[in-house]
Amino acid sequence: MIVKSVLQEDILTMAEVREILDQIRLKRADEEELGYELRRAIRHAELFSKGTAEESLAMVAELMKLEKMNKVIAVKIADVRPVTKDELRAIYAKERFTLSEEELNSILEIVFRG
Protein backbone atom coordinates (compact mmCIF):
# COMPACT_ATOMS: atom_id res chain seq x y z
CA MET A 1 0.00 0.00 0.00
CA ILE A 2 1.43 3.35 -1.03
CA VAL A 3 0.48 6.36 1.08
CA LYS A 4 0.70 9.62 -0.81
CA SER A 5 -0.04 11.99 2.06
CA VAL A 6 -1.45 12.04 5.54
CA LEU A 7 -4.84 13.74 5.58
CA GLN A 8 -5.50 13.69 9.30
CA GLU A 9 -3.78 12.43 12.43
CA ASP A 10 -5.33 11.95 15.85
CA ILE A 11 -4.78 9.89 18.97
CA LEU A 12 -7.41 7.18 19.45
CA THR A 13 -8.25 4.94 22.36
CA MET A 14 -8.08 1.20 21.82
CA ALA A 15 -11.89 0.97 22.11
CA GLU A 16 -12.27 3.51 19.28
CA VAL A 17 -9.79 1.54 17.17
CA ARG A 18 -11.77 -1.67 17.80
CA GLU A 19 -14.99 -0.04 16.61
CA ILE A 20 -13.35 1.41 13.50
CA LEU A 21 -11.79 -1.96 12.65
CA ASP A 22 -15.16 -3.67 13.17
CA GLN A 23 -16.71 -1.28 10.66
CA ILE A 24 -13.94 -2.02 8.17
CA ARG A 25 -14.37 -5.76 8.72
CA LEU A 26 -18.12 -5.55 8.08
CA LYS A 27 -17.62 -3.43 4.96
CA ARG A 28 -14.98 -5.74 3.49
CA ALA A 29 -16.58 -9.04 4.55
CA ASP A 30 -18.70 -9.29 1.41
CA GLU A 31 -16.10 -7.99 -1.01
CA GLU A 32 -12.86 -9.77 -0.20
CA GLU A 33 -10.93 -11.85 2.30
CA LEU A 34 -9.35 -9.86 5.12
CA GLY A 35 -5.59 -9.49 4.92
CA TYR A 36 -3.24 -10.89 7.53
CA GLU A 37 -2.36 -7.48 8.99
CA LEU A 38 -6.00 -6.45 9.30
CA ARG A 39 -6.94 -9.73 10.98
CA ARG A 40 -4.08 -9.33 13.47
CA ALA A 41 -5.01 -5.70 14.16
CA ILE A 42 -8.64 -6.68 14.80
CA ARG A 43 -7.56 -9.48 17.13
CA HIS A 44 -5.21 -7.16 19.04
CA ALA A 45 -7.91 -4.51 19.43
CA GLU A 46 -10.43 -7.11 20.64
CA LEU A 47 -7.99 -8.52 23.20
CA PHE A 48 -6.73 -5.27 24.68
CA SER A 49 -9.61 -2.79 24.45
CA LYS A 50 -11.66 -2.20 27.56
CA GLY A 51 -15.17 -0.81 27.45
CA THR A 52 -16.82 1.01 24.60
CA ALA A 53 -15.60 3.94 22.56
CA GLU A 54 -18.19 6.22 24.19
CA GLU A 55 -16.97 5.29 27.69
CA SER A 56 -13.36 5.84 26.68
CA LEU A 57 -14.09 9.21 25.07
CA ALA A 58 -16.04 10.33 28.14
CA MET A 59 -13.16 9.27 30.39
CA VAL A 60 -10.61 11.12 28.23
CA ALA A 61 -12.78 14.26 28.26
CA GLU A 62 -13.09 14.14 32.04
CA LEU A 63 -9.37 13.47 32.51
CA MET A 64 -8.50 16.42 30.25
CA LYS A 65 -10.13 18.75 32.80
CA LEU A 66 -7.38 17.94 35.30
CA GLU A 67 -4.34 20.17 35.66
CA LYS A 68 -1.37 17.88 34.90
CA MET A 69 -2.98 16.03 31.99
CA ASN A 70 -2.42 15.96 28.26
CA LYS A 71 -4.24 14.01 25.56
CA VAL A 72 -1.58 11.31 25.20
CA ILE A 73 -1.61 10.47 28.91
CA ALA A 74 -5.41 10.65 29.09
CA VAL A 75 -5.74 8.16 26.22
CA LYS A 76 -3.14 5.89 27.82
CA ILE A 77 -5.06 5.96 31.12
CA ALA A 78 -8.34 5.20 29.30
CA ASP A 79 -6.67 2.25 27.53
CA VAL A 80 -4.89 0.77 30.54
CA ARG A 81 -7.48 1.70 33.20
CA PRO A 82 -5.04 1.54 36.11
CA VAL A 83 -6.35 0.18 39.40
CA THR A 84 -3.57 1.19 41.78
CA LYS A 85 -1.53 4.31 42.37
CA ASP A 86 1.63 2.43 41.35
CA GLU A 87 0.16 1.62 37.94
CA LEU A 88 -0.76 5.28 37.54
CA ARG A 89 2.74 6.38 38.56
CA ALA A 90 4.16 4.04 35.90
CA ILE A 91 2.15 5.88 33.24
CA TYR A 92 3.55 9.20 34.49
CA ALA A 93 7.13 7.85 34.83
CA LYS A 94 8.47 9.76 31.80
CA GLU A 95 7.02 13.10 32.86
CA ARG A 96 9.13 15.73 34.54
CA PHE A 97 6.76 16.11 37.47
CA THR A 98 5.23 13.88 40.08
CA LEU A 99 1.63 13.70 41.11
CA SER A 100 0.39 14.39 44.62
CA GLU A 101 -1.79 11.91 46.48
CA GLU A 102 -4.86 14.06 45.81
CA GLU A 103 -4.16 14.13 42.07
CA LEU A 104 -3.63 10.36 41.99
CA ASN A 105 -6.87 9.81 43.90
CA SER A 106 -8.84 12.09 41.59
CA ILE A 107 -7.54 10.27 38.48
CA LEU A 108 -8.33 6.86 39.99
CA GLU A 109 -11.80 8.08 40.91
CA ILE A 110 -12.44 9.03 37.29
CA VAL A 111 -11.17 5.63 36.12
CA PHE A 112 -13.40 3.75 38.56
CA ARG A 113 -16.44 5.77 37.49
CA GLY A 114 -15.71 5.11 33.82
Image (tube, grey):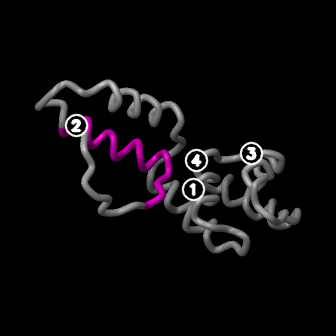
- Residue 45 screen position, x and y as percent: 45, 36
The label shown at residue 75 is: 1
Q: Are marks 1 and 4 in contact (CB under 8 Å)?
A: yes
Kind of residue at badge 2: Leu
- Which disc number belongs to residue 26? 2
Which range of residues does the magenta coloring cover? 10-27
Q: Is residue 6 left or right of residue 93?
A: left
Q: Which mark is residue 79?
A: 4
Quadrant showing the N terminus: top left
Q: Which residue lies at the image location 18% right of the left edge and 39% below the top edge? A: 27
Percent across and percent down for residue 15 are 46, 46
Identified by mark 4, the residue type is Asp
Q: Residue at x 31, y 39 (%)?
A: 22
In which quadrant of the rendered image does the C terminus lie? bottom right
CA distance separating discs 2 and 3: 34 Å
Q: Is residue 98 left or right of residue 79?
A: right
Say which residue label 3 marks.
83
Q: Main secondary structure of the magenta part?
A: helix
Q: Secondary structure at mark 2?
A: helix
Q: Assign a secondary structure to mark 4.
A: helix
Marks 1 and 4, how far apart in space?
6 Å
